[in-house]
Amino acid sequence: MIRAWIDTHRLLAGAILALAMISIATGLHLSTSEGHAGAQPSPTAPSAPAPAPVLPSTAPDTRVDESAHALTAPDFARHAADLLFTWDTTTGDRDVIVEQVLAVADPTGVETPGLVTDLETYLPDDVWWDRLRQYRAAQWFDIETAAVPKEWTDAKTRGATDGLPSGTTAVTVAGTVHRAGYVAGELETASADLVLTVFVACTDDDCAVLRLGAPGAVLDRERLR
């Protein structure tokens, strides 16, 4: 049932995220939609090179600190979200983001094809990445909460999670995505609230990210009936 939930809401993912971000970004000429549904940025690159936007000093640390306490599913879901949503077009390519998320993916490879599809929903494609690079765009995710929803516990009790990898847990991650870049030499920014479900599997020694739910389509009782 959980797997069916993921597949059903995957079809709506691009549209949901695009609508959330376009309303903020249109006036800034910075597309924060992921894929082809977004507002088109100006085709003209800045006339003179602008300094690269600098991620804020409070930008999330994408390393997992395992020294203080045992790694939990919410800890790892937060880490996976940081890897996915924190990037800078002036210092890397989108393929690097994909690779760093896949590096902490299902070690058996069974869930990897689905995860790759999920990543395509959240990341700009190559054409959009090149356009965003014209504006030296950078993005980061201020995560406010990462928690296992009560609905997940209820679903496990009903057997709705049967068939998923051992140790699988759903975590709802919520916060604000920020994007910054230069238009005609002036720094402009956009931001939008984002909530998603991250499915992770943890053992006594490690965790892995399995799949990503669609933007905004978090687990709730109605969707799991």
Image (cartoon, rainbow, N blue to C red):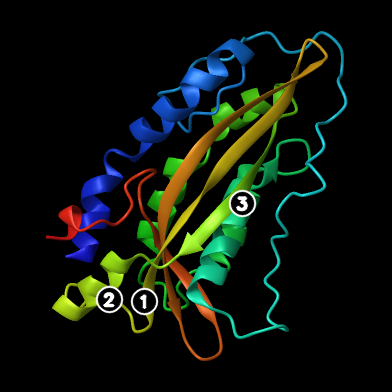
Q: Residues within 10 Å of mark 1 (few under 14, many from 20)?
A: some
Indicate the secondary structure of the residue bearing disc 3: helix
Label 3 crowding class (10 Å Cα cut-off): few <14, some 14-19, many 20+? some
Pointer 3 or 1: first along the chain = 3
Q: Nearer the viewer, residue 203 or 130?
A: 203
Amino acid on which the number 3 mark rests in the picture: Ile
The label on residue 97 is 3
Q: Give me the residue at 58% from left, 80% from top.
A: 71
Q: Position of residue 170 (x, y in %)?
A: 37, 67
Q: Residue at x 59, y 31 (%)?
A: 191
Residue 100 seen:
yes
In the rendered image, residue 95, in percent from the top left (x then y), is placed at 60, 48
Spot the residue most to the left: 225
Residue 204, relative to residue 210: is it above or below?
A: below
Q: Nearer the viewer, residue 75 or 165?
A: 75
Question: Are dots 1 and 2 in contact, CB under 8 Å?
Answer: yes
Q: CA distance from mark 3 to mark 1?
A: 23 Å
Residue 168's tag is 1
Q: Nearer the viewer, mark 3 or mark 2?
A: 2
Residue picked out by circle 2? 164
- The reply to whether dot 3 and dot 2 touch (C-beta < 8 Å) is no
Task: Judge left or right: residue 51 versus residue 106.
Answer: right
In the displayed structure, 125 sits above or below 78; it is above
Label 2: how many Cα within 10 Å (few below 14, some 14–19, many 20+): some
Image quarter of residue 163: bottom left
Residue at x 72% of width, y 22% of height: 135
User: SS at mark 2?
Assistant: loop
Residue 105, image x, y percentages = 49, 69
Q: Is residue 104 visible?
A: no
User: Which amino acid is tagged 1?
Assistant: Thr
Quadrant in which the N terminus is drawn: bottom left
